[in-house]
């Protein structure tokens, strides 16, 4: 007998960055992100009768069999089999699709592993009150930043001594958020859509023994503490300052690692300057952040949508190949299938 379970899981954009990890996907510092709405992965997990011993998995991405990502997912499921008892007597087929174009630098492994962990946990009959915590723990083991996608609005991941619920093993939602930050936008400027030259996992490794590692981890933990306070107080100026400092610190780490590298493109730098000038001239609290790539996330409050859109269209459109408009989201959803 065949049965299907579906989950949609959003991507997230880190405002305080996770960069550097220990075994097994334990972060070297705390991070904090905003959950997105439009950029998400949908996974349909089909269960059927098993024909042989061991894991039976077929993985399809956007309608086509994808053996290389399928192997990564298979290794993940095998490693976490005690959490996914469903694999003992059911064969799995995963059909995954993204709502955003391929290789745009949007963290697709975060939304993909988020949706996979949710679907496998549901299929394994897990329905405890801590379902999302457990899904966050399991998503983290697939892709670190995925653990933050389990919650709407803002989530933090990583243990901070004075934040009671914080953990290195899973993310937790940020409980107190000022109305200034309740409705935020993220316009993603695609400056370059060619595949990244250095993967995130290789980047994390370069933090081992990095000359600035300890200072960077301390800075990120401080930024996380500050950001929790700012999200509560509604201070736009400090919000902007932390986010931009974080983006530049992440890229500074790449540029100063033993095997240094550069992911920003001329268009990236141009966009950052335009955003800072626009903010200075208009006093609108718009800011940039970057992931491990050249594309620019432009973060701003929904109330400033009209002016920021017209700025994006006149001053940033010529630099970008395309702009994806996204917003703060509510977290994962089960889908009917
Ligand atoms: O989750 P990973 O291993 O793909 O690492 C993500 C790293 C950044 O996106 C650069 C930062 C973050 O906190 O999401």
Image (cartoon, rainbow, N blue to C red):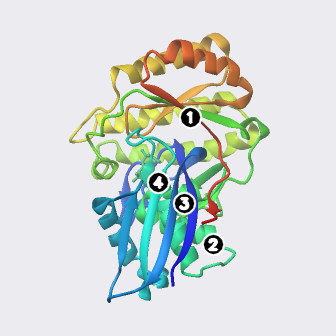
Observer-side mark, 1 or 2, equals: 2
Tell me which label, 2 or 3, sits earlier in the chain: 2
- Dot 1: few (<14), some (14–19), or many (≥20) neighbours within 10 Å? many
Q: Position of residue 15 (x, y in %)?
A: 55, 41
Q: Which residue is mark 3?
A: 159
* Structural distance between the alpha carbons of marks 2 and 3: 20 Å
Q: Position of residue 259 (x, y in %)?
A: 21, 41
Q: Seen in the image, is 193 located left or right of residue 326?
A: left
Question: In 3D space, how far apart are the residues under numbered discs 3 and 1 (Cα atoms)?
Answer: 19 Å
Q: CA distance from mark 1 to mark 4?
A: 33 Å
The numbered mark at residue 131 is 2
> Which residue lies under the disc numbered 1?
242
Left or right of residue 41: residue 231 = right
Could you say whether the residue bearing mark 3 is in a helix, strand or loop?
loop
Which comes sooner in the sequence, label 1 or label 2?
2
Badge 2 marks a residue whose secondary structure is helix
Q: Observer-nearest residue: 282 or 310?
A: 310
Residue at figure coordinates x 61%, y 53% from the top left? 155
Residue 157 in view here: no
Secondary element at image label 4: strand
> What residue is rendered at 40% in x and 56% in y?
63
Label 2 vs 4, first from the N-terminus: 4
Q: Which disc number belongs to residue 152?
A: none
Separation of residues labelled 1 and 2 (CA atoms): 32 Å
Contact (Cβ within 8 Å) of mark 3 with mark 1: no
Residue bearing mark 4: 97
Does label 3 or label 4 sit earlier along the sequence? 4
């Amino acid at each position: 007998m065949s049965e299907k379970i579906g989950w949609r899981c959003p991507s997230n954009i880190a405002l305080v960055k996770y960069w550097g990890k220990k075994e097994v996907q334990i972060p070297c510092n705390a991070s904090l992100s905003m959950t997105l709405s439009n950029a998400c992965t949908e996974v349909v997990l089909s269960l059927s009768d098993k024909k042989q011993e061991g894991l039976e998995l077929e993985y399809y991405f956007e309608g086509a069999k994808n053996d290389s990502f399928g192997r990564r997912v298979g290794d993940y499921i095998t490693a976490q089999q005690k959490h996914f008892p469903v694999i003992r007597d059911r064969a799995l087929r995963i059909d995954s699709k993204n709502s955003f174009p391929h290789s745009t630098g949007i963290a697709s492994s975060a939304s993909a592993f988020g949706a996979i962990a949710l679907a496998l946990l549901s299929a394994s009959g897990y329905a405890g009150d801590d379902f999302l915590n457990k899904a966050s723990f399991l998503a983290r083991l697939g892709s670190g930043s995925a653990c933050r996608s389990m919650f709407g609005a803002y989530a933090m991941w990583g243990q901070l001594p004075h934040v009671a619920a914080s953990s290195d093993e899973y993310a937790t939602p940020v409980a107190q958020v000022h109305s200034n930050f309740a409705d935020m936008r993220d316009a993603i400027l695609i400056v370059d859509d060619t595949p990244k030259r250095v993967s995130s996992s290789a980047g994390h490794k370069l933090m081992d023994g990095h000359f600035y590692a300890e200072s960077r981890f301390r800075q990120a933990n401080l930024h996380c503490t500050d950001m929790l306070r700012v999200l509560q107080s509604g201070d736009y100026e400090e919000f902007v300052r932390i986010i931009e400092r974080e983006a530049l610190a992440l890229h500074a780490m790449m540029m100063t690692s033993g095997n240094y590298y550069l992911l920003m493109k001329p268009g990236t730098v141009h966009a950052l300057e335009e955003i800072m000038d626009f903010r200075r001239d208009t006093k609108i609290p718009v800011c940039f952040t970057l992931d491990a790539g050249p594309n620019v996330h432009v973060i701003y409050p929904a109330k400033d949508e009209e002016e920021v859109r017209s700025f994006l269209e006149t001053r940033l459109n010529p630099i970008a190949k395309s702009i994806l408009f996204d917003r703060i989201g509510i977290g994962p959803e089960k889908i009917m299938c």
